[in-house]
Every structure is written in structure tokens, then in C-alpha cells.
Amino acid sequence: MDDSTVGQGPSLELTPEHRMIRDAARDFAQAEIAPIAAHLDETGEFPLDTIRKMGKLGFMALEVPESEGGAGMDTLAYVLALEEICKVDAAHGTIMSVNNSLVCHALLKFGTPAQRSGFLRPIAAGDRIGAYSLTEPMSGSDAATMKTRAVRQADGSYVLTGRKSWVTSGPVADTIIVFAMTDPEAGHRGISAFIVDAHQPGLIRGKHEPKLGIRASATSEIMLDGYRCPAANRLGAEGEGFKIAMIALDAGRIGIAAQALGIAEAAFDAAVGYAREREAFGHKIGEFQGLQFQIADMKTDIEAARLLIMNAALAKTRARVTGERYTQQASMAKLFASETAMRCAHRAVQIHGGMGYSKELPVERYFRDAKITEIYEGTSEIQRMVIARAALGLR
Ligand code: CAA
């Protein structure tokens, strides 16, 4: 997609290119992911084969320009594709979202030409998997309080020591963007970002998190025990790490919003299908007004979430030209879409009654998967804080 066409005012019209990528993602998800989604949820196996195929199709780096090895699309194309993948399996969506928004976006925006060719290009091609590591056991929402240290050596390299947690794709990642303190006295301005080769000594993959949902997306701790990072692999300037982390999360939150929308739609479709078939008291349950009101609220929330996501996606695409922040738009989209996913999944289970509680149907998986969207990449409480601070002009 040509950058000269962005920034010319918002449009909710999908171009033929947008429809093509959405349909390609839908077809791929139906053909390749739908048959294995329940099994992967059960076993927690990482779906390496399908992720590699998604890489070959460009889904792992949708917004990276073609000149850098990506698909060269805009953010709207990205969210449309992600939504379709997540309608079928949110775990694939988590891997896709982190790779695209937290990793590729940060490398593209802050990487040197050498870093982009050495690290971004193989990730964009789907040959390597990227991860992003900010959180620590005692530093989650208050990300700036991290303890991991990066100490500069005489030769300019850094030695990293510390313990990171909740690293999406941590058990399988090849390249991890790790945030660490280079100057602990300076608070958030003492944080720097490093591109870490996960196959080098000094990086130990810790325990896998046994999760409630998105079970096929592997999550683990990462221990850094004297990991030596060349100066050339520092991402951005020393002390710029917190800003890089936040800018990556602005992009990431749009992705999680699209993931939540996909889950909400899957839950909605299941609820509507069941309400049309299931009978009680001599009627299809969809004929009861109590149920109709729930369907109406679900549908309205889904369409409102979609518009907030499109709004954030268009703001992010415009930012390529204007450089303006889209922090508030991203947080509003994530907040509303994730709470919509949770409400829709909750209602879908209730509408299914006992069958909603059974692993014979995917509805209980949607319910478990939806919850994480209210937690990771900033909890709903953090999103409200970000939205309010922007509205009040506090940041
Ligand atoms: N873009 C650019 N700069 C930003 C920014 C943004 N979105 N947000 C903050 N900043 C800048 C501020 O302007 C400020 O700059 P100065 O140094 O010039 O003052 C600096 O960063 C510090 O900002 P704050 O004072 O607002 O920082 P804070 O300590 O109050 O924290 C916060 C703000 C929004 C609460 C932030 O800590 C936050 O987002 N916390 C949640 C962390 C999070 O989402 N973690 C999830 C990790 S990833 C994950 O979930 C796992 C996975 O793999 C998917």
C-alpha cells in the first residue's frame, strides 16, 4: 500500500486490497487453523507449522514495507486479517499480534538499517519468531519499576541480568526485544531496549505459564544471566527504552483490540446459531425477548468495537505521515473491544446453557480466551488511566 495515499482523511471504505487480505486470512483460518484449534487448546502445543505458513503469506509482518521483507499493507489490512484469524483461534492471533505490532513495529521504527536487515527481515519473512519482554515478576502495570540491569562494558557491549515474565512466544522465540535498566537512578528515563538473540548463552527460558486461555500461544519466563549484548544490538538510544516500549504497546493494543473483536464475533455467531436452533417451552429460544435483548446488545457492542478499531487503525496509518500519537485511540479500542469480547463470550456461554460449559463446543474456549484481552498489553484499568490522562491533558 502506497504511503502517499495515507493521511488524506479517514475513510471507512474497504479497498479491494483490504477485502482481499481479509478474505485470504478468513480462508487460511478456515482451512488450516479451524481443524486443529480445539486440539491445540487441549494440548497447549505451539502451532509452529501454521505460524510458518502465515509467515510465508505475509501475515507475520503485514505493515512492514515490501522493501524490508514485509507485506507492505496498512493498519486496517492488519486488523482485518487478525480479526479473521482470531475468529477461529485467538492463540494464533496472539502470536501474530505480538510479532507484528510489538516486534516488527518497534524494529521498523527504531532499528538501524543493519538491525532491520539482520533481525527484522527474517522475522518479517516468517523464518524467525519475535517476542517482546517488558514485564517482570514484580513489575507489570508499573512497567518503569523493572529490576533487570544492563551494564555497559569497556568494549561498549552490555551485560544483561534479570528475570522477565509473561513473555509471549518466549519458549520458541528467536529474537526478543528486552527492556532493561541502564541507569536505575533515572527511573523510566534509565531504561534501554535491546535486541536479544535468544539462542546465545546467558539467556535461559524459564517455566511455561499454564494458562486459562490462548493455550497454544506459548508463554514463559526468560532469565538473563550475564547475557552479553553487543552495542550494535541496542535498539534506540540509551534511556529511550521506556518510550520505545510504550510506542510499541500503542501499536500492540490495536492488535489486541482486533483479537478481542474476532473472539466476540465468534461467540456472537455461535450464540445466534444456537438461538435459532434450540427449543424450549415450545419455541426457538431466539423468539424470547430476554434473549433477543442480549443478541441486540452483543451486536451493537461488536459494531461499536469495530468502529473504534478502524478509528485507531486509520490513526496509526496516518501517523506514518503526520507522526502524531494514537495512544488514546489505541487504548479506547482495546478497552472497549476486550470488554465486548468478555461480555459476548459470557452471554454466549449462558445462551448455550449446559452446552456452553462443555468442551464439545468452542464457546467455552472463547470465554477462556476472551479474558486475557482485558489483561495483557495493559489491563482495562491501565487503558482507562491512559484515556483519562490524554483527555485531561495530563500527559
Ligand atoms: N508514547 C510515547 N511516549 C510515551 C507513551 C506513549 N504511548 N506513554 C508514555 N510515554 C512517555 C511519557 O511522555 C513520559 O515521557 P517523559 O520521559 O518525557 O516524561 C514517559 O513516557 C513516562 O510516562 P508516564 O509518566 O505516563 O509513565 P508511567 O510510569 O506513569 O506509566 C503507563 C504509564 C501507561 C501506566 C505505563 O506504565 C503502562 O502502559 N503500563 C502497562 C504496561 C503494559 O501494558 N504491560 C504489558 C506488557 S506486554 C504483555 O502484555 C505481554 C505480551 O507479550 C503480549
Image (tube, rainbow, N blue to C red):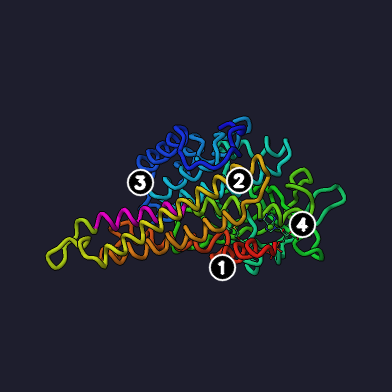
Q: Main secondary structure of the magenta part?
A: helix
Q: In 3D space, how far apart are the residues under numbered discs 2 and 1 (Cα atoms)?
A: 32 Å
Quarter of the view holding residue 49: top left
* Residue at screen point 51% across, 49% down: 95
Question: Which amino acid type is shown beneath numbered disc 3?
Answer: Ala
Quarter of the view holding residue 358: bottom left
Q: What element carries label 2?
A: loop
Is the residue 199 above or below the residue 58 in the image? below
Can you identify the residue that label 2 sits on?
Answer: 174
Can you identify the residue that label 3 sits on?
Answer: 34
- Residue 26 visible within the image: yes
Displayed-image quarter of ligand 1: bottom right
Question: Which amino acid type is shown beneath numbered disc 2?
Answer: Asp
Q: Is mark 3 on a helix, strand or loop?
A: loop
| Magenta segment includes 138 | no
How far across and down, in percent of the image, does residue 308 sit?
Answer: 50, 53
Can you identify the residue that label 1 sits on?
Answer: 381
Are the residues flagged by discs 1 and 4 in contact, CB closer than 8 Å? no
Q: In 3D space, how far apart are the residues under numbered discs 3 and 4 (Cα atoms)?
A: 43 Å
Question: Which amino acid type is shown beneath numbered disc 1?
Answer: Glu
Tell me which numbered mark, 1 or 4, is placed earlier along the sequence: 4
How far across and down, in percent of the image, does residue 46 sit?
Answer: 47, 50
* Residue at screen point 87% across, 50% down: 154
